[in-house]
Image (spheres, rainbow, N blue to C red):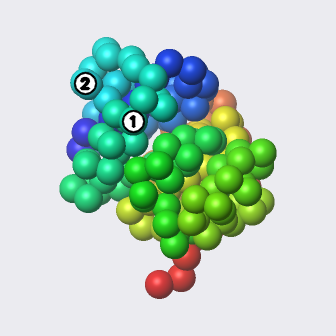
Amino acid sequence: MRIEIPVFDGFDELDAVGPFEVLRNAALAGANWDAALVGADGPGCRQQARDGRLPAALAEIAPSAAWTASVCTGAMLLAEAGLVTGRPATTHRNALADLSLAGALVVAGARVVDDGDLLTAAGVTSGLDLALWLVEREYGPDAASTVSRGMEYERRGEVYRRSR
């Protein structure tokens, strides 16, 4: 599986590099995926997030993706793409009201929200927890523990999963 993490002018480096590091370590431990940092126009391209191209690209690829995820206020880009409407989601505490106004069913206080093919994480360090949750969800708790221990990172908080 190919996992693409978009980077753009003004992004918070830890929002992208933290999950990238978790996913890369999971691949080294045997996960069948390849993580890459990309721009909306392909690998190595950075652009303005608010110029409309990134939300448009997200809206275009999300229906064919196994899942779409965001960290921190990246959830607002998912909202611009129309991907959070009527779905549980979270973002940085300072943007929760905006996410609600964008139509999300905000799960305040959740560090990670898993709604199947849409996953969101609260603040910047919760991106590590989101990526470790993906490792656990796809490869099991032992795989996530192996990656977490290897990175010397102790997971925090609970994952909110909507009952289906």
Under tag 1, what secondary structure?
loop
Say if residue 136 shows up in the picture. Answer: no
Q: In the image, is 46 to the left or to the right of 91? A: left
Give 63 or 66, whichever is nearer the viewer: 63
Which amino acid type is marked by label 2?
Gly
Give 57 or 38, whichever is nearer the viewer: 57
Q: What residue is shown with label 1?
A: 52
Callout 1 touching callout 2 (CB < 8 Å): no
Q: What residue is shown with label 2?
A: 42
Say if residue 127 shows up in the picture. Answer: yes
For mark 2, does the 10 Å Cα neighbourhood hold few (<14), some (14 to 19), or many (20 or more) residues? Answer: few
Q: Residue 37 in the image: state x and y as whole percent.
A: 37, 25
For mark 1, does the 10 Å Cα neighbourhood hold few (<14), some (14 to 19), or many (20 or more) residues? Answer: few
Q: In the image, is 88 to the left or to the right of 5? A: right
**Location of residue 127 (image quadrant):** top right
Instruction: Name which residue lies at 63% across and 56% down.
Output: 99
Can you tell which of label 1 and label 2 is closer to the viewer?
A: 1
Q: Residue 109 in the image: state x and y as whole percent.
A: 77, 60
Q: Residue 135 in the image: state x and y as whole percent.
A: 45, 49
Under tag 2, what secondary structure?
strand
Instruction: Name which residue lies at 49% across and 43% down.
Output: 77
Instruction: Name which residue lies at 61% across and 70% down.
Output: 105
Residue at the extreme front: 51
Instruction: Name which residue lies at 42% across and 29% down.
Output: 51
